[in-house]
Amino acid sequence: MLRGLTTITYVATDVAAAAAWYTELLGVAPYFARPDAEAPAYVEFRIGDRQAELGIVDARWIAGGQSDRPSGTVTYWAVDDVQAAYDRLLALGATPHEPPTERGEGFVTASVVDPYGNVVGVMYNQHYLGMLETTATPPLLTTTPTA
């Protein structure tokens, strides 16, 4: 029934500011914005090995409203160096949620709270790396192939 993650959605009261913060963090701009890039209520990035979608939605659209404190499920993004990722997130204005913690051989996690109240997790995960080795796909084409 569950085939894989499609989109992770974070919430912000200022989507344009959150989009700018995540653009700085990710090194890419959103590829999609509604209603438009000047006054977005939703933006979406494609990131990582599998071009996962990270969406940022206006808090007014969230069912039940938004809490003023971090809560809920933590989504962990695969990284090569948890400490370096954690430090970069903090340098960009996130606050500590859980410091880098070894969970067993080949598994390290950490999490922060972004400036908009979302918990963002980072993880070094041997299972993820093993999956990449067994399901290797060619890189996305950024140019038209020539004959």
Image (cartoon, rainbow, N blue to C red):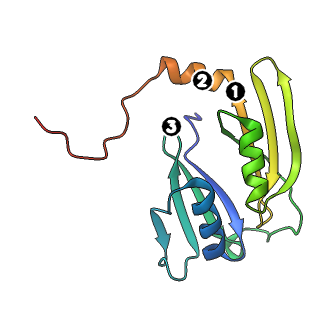
One can see residue 75 in this view:
no
Residue in the image at 65% along x and 21% along y: 127
Residue denoted by label 1: 125
Q: Position of residue 104 (x, y in %)?
A: 83, 20
- Vertical placement of residue 122 versus 25, above or below: above
Q: Position of residue 124 (x, y in %)?
A: 71, 30
Gap between marks 1 and 3 measured at Cα: 14 Å
- Vertical placement of residue 35 versus 141, above or below: below
At label 2, counting other C-alpha atoms closer than 10 Å, the crowd grade (few under 14, some 14-19, many 20 or more) is few
Residue 103 is left or right of residue 17, and the answer is: right
Q: Secondary structure at mark 1?
A: strand
Residue 89 is left or right of residue 18, and the answer is: right
Toward which corner of the image does residue 123 lie, by quadrant? top right
Query: Which residue type carries mark 1?
Result: Asn
Gap between marks 3 and 2 measured at Cα: 11 Å
Toward which corner of the image does residue 82 lie, by quadrant? top right
Instruction: State yes or no: discs 1 and 3 in contact (Cβ < 8 Å).
Output: no
Q: Nearer the viewer, residue 133 or 41?
A: 133
One can see residue 120 in this view:
yes
Residue denoted by label 3: 49
Q: Position of residue 80 (x, y in %)?
A: 65, 33
Residue in the image at 59% along x and 18% along y: 130
Q: Secondary structure at mark 2?
A: helix
